[in-house]
Image (cartoon, coloured by chain):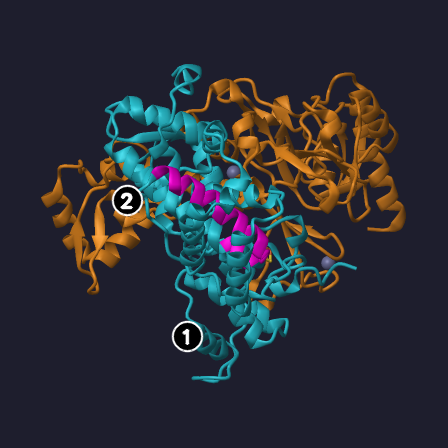
Amino acid sequence: MDSSNLSSIRMGTGDLAKYPFLNEAGEYLRESGFGWEELERPDMKDVIDRAAERVEVEVSGNIYDKLDRYEIEILTFLVSLIMVKSIGMESVLRKFTLAEARRAEKFLTEDLKRQNEMQKRSLFAKIFDDLFKLKIEISEDGRLLKVKVPDYLARSSHFHEQEWKLINRLVHNGYVYLDVDETVRLVRNELSVLIYEKIRMMTLPTLPQAIKVKADDLRSKLAPRYEYRVTAVTEYPPCVKHALEVMGRGENLPHSARVMLATYMLAIRKPVDQIVMMYENAPDFNEKITRYQVEHLAGMKGSRTKYSVPSCDKLRNENLCFAIAECNGIINPIQFGRKRK
Amino acid sequence: MTQSALAKTISAVRSAFRGYYFKPNMIETPDMIEQREFGYMQFAQVGMVRHLSFNSMKELTATIIKEAPADIYCSNAYYRFPTYPMQEKQWLGADLIFDIDGKDLHLPCVSSHSYFVCANCGRASASAPDEKKGYPCQLCSGKELDSVSIPCANCIDGSKKEVKHLIEFLTGDLGMKQGAIQVYFSGNNGFHVHISDGAYARLDPQARSDLVGYISGAGLMAESVGVRKRNAENLFLIKFPKSGLAYGWRARVADKLKIKSSSIIKLKHIVEQRGGYTPFKVDVDRMARDMGVRIDPQVTTDVHRVFRMPGTLNSKSGLVKMKCGDLDSFDPLVEACLLGDNKVSVRVKTSVKLKLKNKSFNISKESAELPAYAAVYLICKRLAEAN
Ligand code: SF4
Ligand SMILES: [Zn+2]
Ligand SMILES: [Zn+2]
């Protein structure tokens, strides 16, 4: 398809409100003559309140889905980025970006299901191709979408549900066939990385007073919940590292991987409290249940048997092994890094 | 082996190897040579000399001729700084490689050409060790025996079949171009299949492991062919996936079961016959694994591995790892057997039969004068030493 032609298709303000991370959203604001001073105006109070609400809702794991006034929501997004940046806490940033990604994912799915082929192609060109370098084509019979196998693998292999394994997909002649939900799901992580990077790269102007007050407010509200929970993931074996990364992204980790992670951490004598907090980002996190499970594995509860770390063989069978050269010659993750001088 | 016999044996093999490397243009030049990591093993020394880098084949060949190594390796990966320690190399990508090893195929002929060599004293024998006695060596009562195989024509054919099976997956399901697929004889008892496709080169170990699962038929769910689990044990319902059963694994299994994505009643009947969801699921999994290709998963998922270089000698056999032109007619025991035929006198540890360069050797005497290629082959297999 001729993407140079398609990228000249202008996105409407509705699209920009749904996908405010697109560069066009910034351009739109610039063209409409928006400046920072504007935010001091009393009628901007609504935007600032909405932005604070957006941050709060999303940090608690929900999606902010107001979309009644397009221009306002484009601004709200921008102001919420500023707030998150000035709160300056890593876990707030991570939760916010994750929820923003889910939000965009929701709109994207709806749009792709509703639109005609031409409109679809323009969204593909704008979002998938421009932002993620992912070429999406429409299947021969027009019912499905298809992506190249390596493009699929590069993304899907970080998901853990069995149905995302290539073998459980329809694969033909170098392409993987997907429906709209699946296609959009494929880029969720990239969406959140994109928003994450946007915030990280931002340089804050001197904040308008109204925003500063709100941001300080939010910080003192959120700080006790999220501070000091950063786990260093450096010298762990790849399988453990991988499990921590999946957790960090707030994705679901299979039960066997959770067991592996906990038994490993117990074996290196991490305190139970710290281990429990490693699961904090799991979508189904419940502190009480997690604590019980960890204590159970530690032999402090229930059967009182202490569980050992599963062997590399076992992990390999469960597709949880991501061996690197340094894994040569070890049979249990616990030996990782120990045999070396 | 006595010290002097060992020294003599090593020097015989080494000089045969060096003679080979003196011939021009034997080694295939890897693309992006400056970005690769090289390594080699020396005779009778443990551990690999690694993290080497060469800017040209000339530099590499000079080192090879000087050292006459036992085995020479090159990374499938390319790095910004190939000589740095692993963590600092900066990985840029790695060729996708598949390894098909004859010994993983468990062919019935293997026991007829296997030998057992004591890991301690090197005593060799054709008779299978007594498992119950815990393998004691009759000479030194060492407990560890290595099994050594002299692949026969049937072994080679078995591996070739597996290679063709792999190529079907690569060109069919995965849509790769024939020209992107290079098949190499490994130099001993198998094949390496190298893929030159930039899009695959950037994939990380997880993505490669998923690809391995696909090709080897591991992890196919009953749901993928339309059988879904219901809450209660063994209950199921039929719901075909939206994308149908027309291609890939779904088509393979559907063909086996003789169903189409309209055969709801037929499939329901099949599952019931099998005894419900769980047994059917087990069945699907087994079926897929049987139809998959037997590749070594570790080799393909490792993106920091070094691989034997095409055109170099394999110290397990003295044969060359080399590109196969036409796979069907390729005979490694002729085409990859490239050492000279000057006579070398050897002491053979056990009576042995082999065929190299279309010449059959049936050796039952202890001392023999053999052409270098055959002498080196037996020495590399640890069934002989220099006399
Ligand atoms: S080899 Fe063992 S330690 Fe290394 S990644 Fe695999 S399971 Fe983990
Ligand atoms: Zn012995
Ligand atoms: Zn055989």
Q: Secondary structure at mark 1?
A: helix
Q: Residues within 10 Å of mark 1 (few under 14, many from 20)?
A: few
The disc label shown at residue A289, or none: 1
The answer to whether mark 1 and mark 2 are in CB contact below 8 A is no
Using the image as rendered, state which of residue B335 and residue B99 is in the foreground.
B99
Q: Colour of chain B?
A: orange
B183 is higher (above) or lower (below) than B75: above
The span shown in magenta is A70-94
**Which chain is cyan in the picture?**
A
A318 is higher (above) or lower (below) than B209: below
The alpha-carbon separation of the residues under discs 1 and 2 comes to 33 Å
Q: Quadrant of residue A53?
A: bottom left
Residue B48 belongs to the span the image colors magenta: no
> Residue A294 appears at what percent x and percent y?
49, 75
> Residue A341 appears at what percent x and percent y?
79, 59
User: Which quadrant does the N terminus of chain A fall into?
Assistant: top left
Q: Residue at x 82, y 29 (%)?
A: B64
Q: Residue furthest front?
A: A42
The disc label shown at residue A164, or none: none
Q: Residue at x 81, y 45 (%)?
A: B44
Amino acid at pointer 1: Ile
Q: Is residue A22 visible?
A: yes
Amino acid at pointer 2: Ser
Using the image as rendered, state which of residue B108 and residue B282 is in the foreground.
B282
Using the image as rendered, state which of residue B304 and residue B121 is in the foreground.
B304
Q: Quadrant of residue A227?
A: bottom right
Main SS class of the magenta portion in the image = helix
The answer for which chain carries disc 1 is A
Q: Is residue A262 visible?
A: no
Residue identifier under label 2: B224
